[in-house]
Image (cartoon, rainbow, N blue to C red):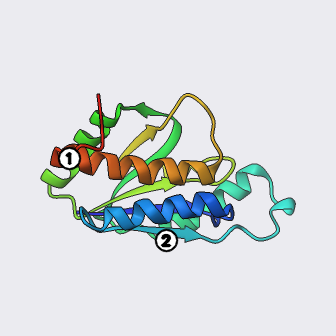
Amino acid sequence: MDILLITVGKTTTGYIQTGIDEYCKRLRRYVPFSMKCLPDIKNVRKLTESQQKTEEGKLILNELAVSDYVVLLDERGEMLSSRGFSEFLQKGMLGGKKRMVFVVGGPYGFSHDVYNRANAKLSLSNMTFSHEMIRLFFTEQVYRAMTILRGEPYHHD
């Protein structure tokens, strides 16, 4: 199973990008993992919040295949422990899913069309983090999940 992380906008903070790169490099030993950074919407000051979500939603939906299992990283999603997340990924792998796509939306979240396309929603915390930090936390959690599934000594309960 391939794992794709779709994000809206670039990671511009150097130390966060360094961390993301490190976990992406580590993940290569376990699973095909990639990131797709969609461009920021142009002229957002002229758009309402709803219009911005709609435009971002079109970009997100254009990246998805019909067979993709789509998981939104959303504050209203289900919260899992690291072990629970590893089980979530394992179910996807054992369930024959070709590609699991995780999506970090823009500053206002997701459009209705993206919510309707999603198969699941996960929350990484009750706290609010910047979208850049979520990218780092998520890549680390995918790496942690892979080490849990392999019984490697990275995660400690």
Local SS, label 1: loop
Q: Which mark is residue 62?
A: 2
Q: Nearer the viewer, residue 18 or 122?
A: 18
Residue at the right extreme? 46
Q: Nearer the viewer, residue 35 or 48?
A: 35
Residue 43 in the image, given as x and y percentages of width and height: 82, 68
Quadrant showing the N terminus: bottom left
Q: In terms of sequence position, does the residue under pointer 1 or pointer 2 come before the other?
A: 2
Percent across and percent down for residue 147 are: 25, 48
| Residue 15 seen in render | yes
Specify the amino acid type for callout 1: Glu
Mark whose residue sits in front, 1 or 2: 1
Tell me residue 128's x, y (percent).
Answer: 63, 35
Extreme front residue here?
Answer: 153
Q: Considering the numbered disc 2 on the image, is that residue within a helix, a strand or a loop?
A: helix
* Left or right placement of residue 33 versus residue 95 in this view: right
State the image quarter where residue 37 is shown. Answer: bottom right
Q: Amino acid at mark 2?
A: Asn
Crowd around label 2: few <14 · some 14–19 · many ≥20 (10 Å): few
Q: Residue at x 29, y 44 (%)?
A: 154
Point out which mark residue 152 bears: 1
Q: Are marks 1 and 2 in contact (CB under 8 Å)?
A: no
Quadrant where the C terminus lies? top left
